[in-house]
Image (spheres, grey):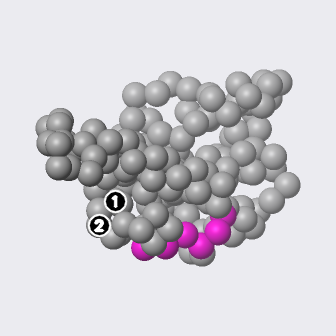
């Protein structure tokens, strides 16, 4: 992004616009964090901050390192991991509880981020986090893309 300062006739500087854009992106990220289980798509998120979907995606990726849909799916998988650790819901119930409408897409994305399928995670996670405070279990079991998981030794 350019750091050119505005001239006397400009309404604001490029830096001020960048700060306004970052505030809008924070609103989008916060909405995803709050409403992850709702049917959200990039177009709806963009409409909420008066941006085009393409512009939102580019700006979000630049600010947070991943596009909004990927961020949304990561939040859903994090919540799914917590529900699967509880052990009282089936994989299908967890899929729908976190806002996914396709069990296949959910399972594929889960395996990409966590490194194992949801059913394997559910079976193995109870042992891996037994006796851990929930705040520690959440940090230890935070999902990472499977290419990153290959280097982890603590995959639960």
At mark 2, the secondary structure is helix
Q: Which residue is mark 1?
A: 57
Residue 65 falls in image quadrant: top left
In the image, farthest residue toward the front: 8
Residue 82 placed where, x, y %? 72, 45
The residues bearing labels 2 and 1 have C-alpha atoms spaced at a distance of 5 Å
Asked if residue 93 is among those painted magenta in the image, a careful observer would answer: no
Q: Which segment did they paint magenta?
A: 37-44
Residue 67 placed where, x, y %? 37, 54
Residue ID at (32%, 42%): 16
Q: How many marks?
A: 2
Q: Which residue is mark 2?
A: 54
Q: Which secondary structure is most common in the magenta stretch? A: loop
Give neighbour class at mark 1: few <14, some 14-19, many 20+ (Cα, 10 Å): many
Tell whether label 1 touches label 2 (CB within 8 Å). yes
Res 152 label: none
Residue ID at (39%, 48%): 20
The residue closer to the viewer here, 29 or 151, is 29
Residue 156 placed where, x, y %? 62, 35
Residue 127 placed where, x, y %? 75, 33
Residue 125 falls in image quadrant: top right
Residue ID at (42%, 68%): 50
Image quadrant in which the N terminus is located? top left
The residue closer to the viewer here, 39 or 60, is 60
Residue ID at (62%, 34%): 141
């Amino acid at each position: 992004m350019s750091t050119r300062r505005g001239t006397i006739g400009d309404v604001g500087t490029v830096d001020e616009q960048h700060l306004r854009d970052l505030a809008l992106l924070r609103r989008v990220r916060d909405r995803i964090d709050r409403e992850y289980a709702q049917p959200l798509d990039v177009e709806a998120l963009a409409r909420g901050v008066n941006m085009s979907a393409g512009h939102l995606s580019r700006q979000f990726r630049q600010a947070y390192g991943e596009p909004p849909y990927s961020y949304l799916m990561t939040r859903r998988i994090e919540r799914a991991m917590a529900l699967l650790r509880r052990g009282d819901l089936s994989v299908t119930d967890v899929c729908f509880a976190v806002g996914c409408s396709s069990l296949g897409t959910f399972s594929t994305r889960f395996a990409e981020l966590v490194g194992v399928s949801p059913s394997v995670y559910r079976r193995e996670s109870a042992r891996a986090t037994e006796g851990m405070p929930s705040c520690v279990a959440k940090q230890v079991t935070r999902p990472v893309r499977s290419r990153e998981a290959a280097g982890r030794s603590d995959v639960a």
